[in-house]
């Protein structure tokens, strides 16, 4: 019993430490993300460019995880890939301060997304070992809640910089500070927990010829969920273009979404461990309201839409990832997370690119397509739940 208690505490400690790493990293890339839509608009980019940038970034950030997930399982160099990915992020985002034209800014945003692809399957695999020990919903939910503290803090700091007359360039340059702290925390985690796989009890794996059929249906629903999601950059572009929300207040609104994200991730993580997949169906149904609300043109309704968007984001970053462990053995988890994220990224790219074009053409059609995709995803999730043994 003492051994079990000790391993549980160690698992929680690892999740918290990696949560601090993600907290600091989020201050870098979520801080940059909170300004990217307005920044591209100020540099002269169109709505189509903003939409394509968001979509292409997610395609790179998620699609390449299939490659790096396979690579992480083949090499077992989970820590190396994680550290390299975070390092590249910390270099790319502050360099946005040097961008004087939107093509350069777009290029740096693509580099940041590549770095996310490089580290995420390996990091998720490391985290999954500890999360499996404490409960996957709680584990990923706790990590996401800590993660979102940084996602809240950075936009607020950057909003204050802009509010007192600071430039976008100054705001981006300040992000180097949490970046350096992130690397220090990551190196500490590497030395304290060189083999996170030791945190979970070794049990015999069932022999399988491949991933379960329910996993592929689940991937389809995840893909539709991703395609239906409007990137915040396009919503921020809309708020700036219509002057519905002041430019300096948009990062504050993004910070609000991150607070909601953190609370939702932790709350739904605990709920997921209790009742399982039906939680995802309910969240997806709620998420269908986010797009019509954000583009309603009414301030209060738009803010409510961002809150719902934050709830959906919290689900994406916690229990959507946690559910992967239901269908995959531990020794294939890096590849499974790579496949999961590749599906998510390709779908997000298609949706974001389409929504960017539809925004310039017909906003009501954009809203209708988004809602329809969410509802189809709900139907498939219900099917997955019905097939659950």
Image (tube, rainbow, N blue to C red):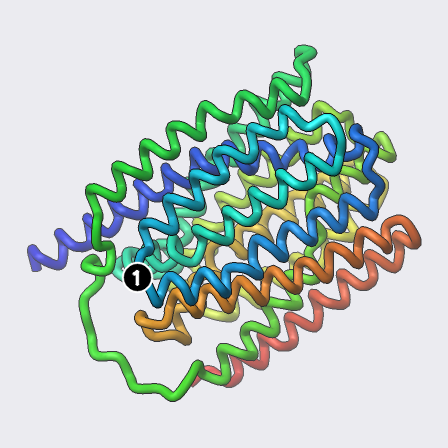
Of residues 183 and 266, the one nearer the viewer is 183
83 in relation to 102, above or below = below
Asked if one can make out residue 275 in the rendered structure from this viewpoint, the answer is: no
Which residue is disc 1 drawn over?
76
Of residues 353 and 105, the one nearer the viewer is 105
Q: Position of residue 387 (x, y in %)?
A: 50, 85
Q: Is 386 situated left or right of 207 in this image?
A: right
- Residue at image location 43% in from the left, 38% down from the top: 87
Of residues 277 and 249, the one nearer the viewer is 249
Q: Position of residue 8 (x, y in %)?
A: 20, 54
Q: Is 84 situated left or right of 2 in this image?
A: right
Q: Position of residue 185 (x, y in %)?
A: 32, 34
44 in relation to 282, above or below = above
Q: Quadrant of residue 186?
A: top left
User: Which quadrant is home to the C terminus?
Assistant: bottom left
- Residue at image location 50% in from the left, 68% down from the top: 339
- Residue at image location 79% in from the left, 30% down from the top: 43
193 in relation to 90, above or below = below
User: Which quadrant is home to the N terminus?
Assistant: bottom left
Q: Secondary structure at mark 1?
A: loop
- Residue at image location 42% in from the left, 62% down from the top: 322
């Amino acid at each position: 019993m003492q051994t079990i208690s000790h391993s549980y505490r160690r698992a929680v400690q690892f999740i918290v430490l990696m949560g601090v790493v993600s907290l600091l990293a989020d201050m870098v890339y979520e801080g940059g993300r909170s300004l990217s839509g307005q920044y591209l608009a100020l540099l002269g980019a169109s709505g189509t460019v903003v939409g394509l940038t968001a979509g292409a970034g997610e395609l790179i950030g998620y699609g390449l995880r299939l490659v790096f997930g396979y690579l992480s399982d083949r090499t077992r160099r989970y820590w190396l890939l994680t550290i390299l990915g975070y390092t590249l992020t910390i270099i790319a985002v502050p360099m946005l301060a040097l961008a004087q034209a939107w093509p350069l800014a777009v290029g740096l945003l693509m580099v940041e997304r590549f770095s996310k692809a490089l580290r995420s399957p390996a990091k998720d695999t490391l985290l999954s070992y500890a999360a499996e020990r404490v409960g996957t919903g709680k584990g990923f939910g706790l990590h996401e809640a800590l993660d979102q503290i940084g996602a809240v803090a950075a936009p607020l700091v950057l909003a204050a910089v802009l509010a007192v007359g600071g430039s976008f360039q100054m705001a981006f340059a300040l992000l180097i500070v949490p970046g350096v702290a992130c690397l220090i925390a990551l190196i500490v985690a590497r030395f304290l927990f060189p083999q996170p796989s030791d945190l979970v009890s070794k049990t015999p794996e069932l022999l399988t010829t491949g991933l379960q059929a329910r996993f592929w249906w689940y991937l389809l629903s995840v893909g539709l969920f991703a395609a239906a999601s409007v990137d915040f950059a396009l919503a921020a572009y809309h708020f700036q273009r219509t002057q519905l929300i002041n430019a300096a207040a948009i990062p504050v609104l993004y910070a609000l979404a991150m607070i909601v994200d953190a609370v939702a991730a932790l709350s739904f993580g605990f709920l997921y461990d209790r009742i399982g997949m039906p939680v995802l169906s309910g969240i997806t149904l709620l998420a269908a309201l986010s797009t019509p609300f954000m583009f309603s043109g009414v301030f209060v309704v738009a803010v409510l839409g961002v809150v719902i968007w934050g709830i959906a984001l919290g689900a994406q970053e916690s229990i959507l990832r946690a559910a992967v462990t239901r269908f995959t053995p531990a020794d294939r988890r890096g590849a499974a997370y790579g496949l999961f994220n590749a599906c998510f990224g390709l779908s997000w790219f298609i949706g974001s690119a389409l929504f960017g074009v539809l925004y310039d053409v017909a906003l009501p059609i954009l809203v209708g397509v988004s809602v329809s995709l969410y509802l189809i995803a709900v139907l498939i999730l219900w099917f997955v739940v019905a097939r659950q043994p």
